Image: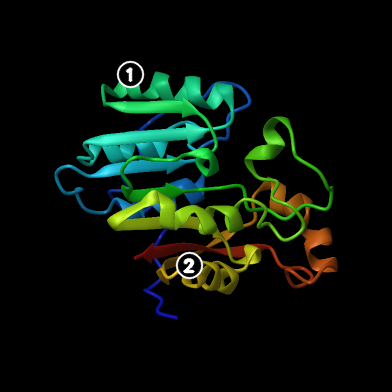
């Protein structure tokens, strides 16, 4: 497994735009900024088609359009997230199409050259489908309820030259993501890694995560990784 050097979460020149957020929409946080700083460090080639999965505020979609993407599709199952993305695209005067649909239900006529994914990835004890704000982070007992299906969907979503960049916590299982992508014939590696303090959700669940062996007792930080996959 190839890993690049650790990078700061909010380094100089991180390409995230300022965005507004409707109530109930996932707040742009360190993981979003980290993914943007890795995936959008350089201008995108002319004609690039981008898919932003679980778009939330649309910050990544807007950043991709500002970086030169010709076509940006942002998807989310939350109605307010879609409205927020459209509002932010209009504020920044960039061409972003926002749709209320799961990326798993997309059947693109053409694949995407860059897929950006910041899916829910925090393990939770409660079974069932999360609702409200919780669905922005709750991802089943291992944190992989959406990560695994997204890995499975990548061959259908990527163009021949396509690249996927997904951010998630080490708690979610880095090797499991790499193995899942490779099982579909993709080349996968860790593109970058950084360490951050636990946020409110992780702090609240620290006892549960320690009890099931996903973190060490007393642990208060986590590694975020950006996984890169290509054909």
Marks 2 and 1, Cα distance to the nearest angstrom?
37 Å
Residue for point 43% across, 70% down? 185
Judge depth for marks 2 and 1 and give the one in front.
2
Left or right of 158 on screen, residue 41: left
Residue ranking furthest to the bottom: 1
Q: Position of residue 51 (x, y in %)?
A: 38, 42
Q: Position of residue 79 (x, y in %)?
A: 57, 22
Residue for point 85% across, 67% down? 211
Quarter of image, res 212: bottom right
Q: Is residue 65 above or below residue 148?
A: above
Left or right of 120 on screen, residue 194: left
Res 38 seen here:
no
Residue ranking furthest to the left: 46
Q: Is residue 107 above or below residue 132?
A: below
Instruction: State the colouring used for the structure image.
Output: rainbow
Q: Quadrant of the C terminus?
A: bottom left
Residue for point 42% across, 57% down? 155
Q: Position of residue 32 (x, y in %)?
A: 46, 46
Left or right of 59 on screen, residue 110: left
Which residue is denoted by mark 2 in the rendering? 184
Which one is in front, 180 or 121?
A: 180
Disc number at residue 90?
A: 1
Q: Position of residue 63 (x, y in %)?
A: 32, 38
């Amino acid at each position: 497994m190839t890993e690049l050097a650790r990078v700061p979460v909010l380094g100089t020149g991180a390409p995230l735009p300022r965005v507004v957020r409707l109530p109930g929409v996932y707040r742009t946080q360190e993981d979003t900024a980290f993914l943007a700083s890795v995936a959008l460090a350089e201008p995108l080639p002319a004609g690039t088609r981008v898919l932003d999965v679980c778009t939330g505020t649309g910050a990544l979609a807007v950043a991709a359009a500002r970086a030169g993407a010709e076509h940006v599709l942002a998807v989310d199952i939350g109605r307010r997230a879609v409205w927020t993305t459209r509002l932010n695209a209009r504020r920044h005067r960039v061409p972003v199409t926002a749709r209320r649909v799961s990326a798993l239900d997309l059947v693109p006529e053409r694949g995407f050259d860059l897929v950006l994914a910041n899916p829910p990835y925090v393990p939770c004890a409660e079974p069932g489908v999360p609702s409200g704000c919780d669905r922005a982070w709750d991802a089943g007992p291992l944190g992989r309820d959406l990560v695994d299906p997204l890995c499975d969907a990548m061959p259908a979503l990527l163009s021949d030259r396509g690249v996927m960049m997904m951010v998630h916590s080490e708690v979610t299982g880095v090797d499991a993501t790499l193995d899942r992508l490779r099982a579909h014939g993709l080349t996968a590696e860790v593109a970058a890694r950084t360490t951050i303090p636990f946020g409110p959700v992780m702090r609240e669940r620290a006892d549960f995560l320690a009890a099931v062996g996903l973190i060490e007792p007393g642990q208060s930080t986590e590694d975020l990784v950006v996984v890169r996959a290509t054909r």
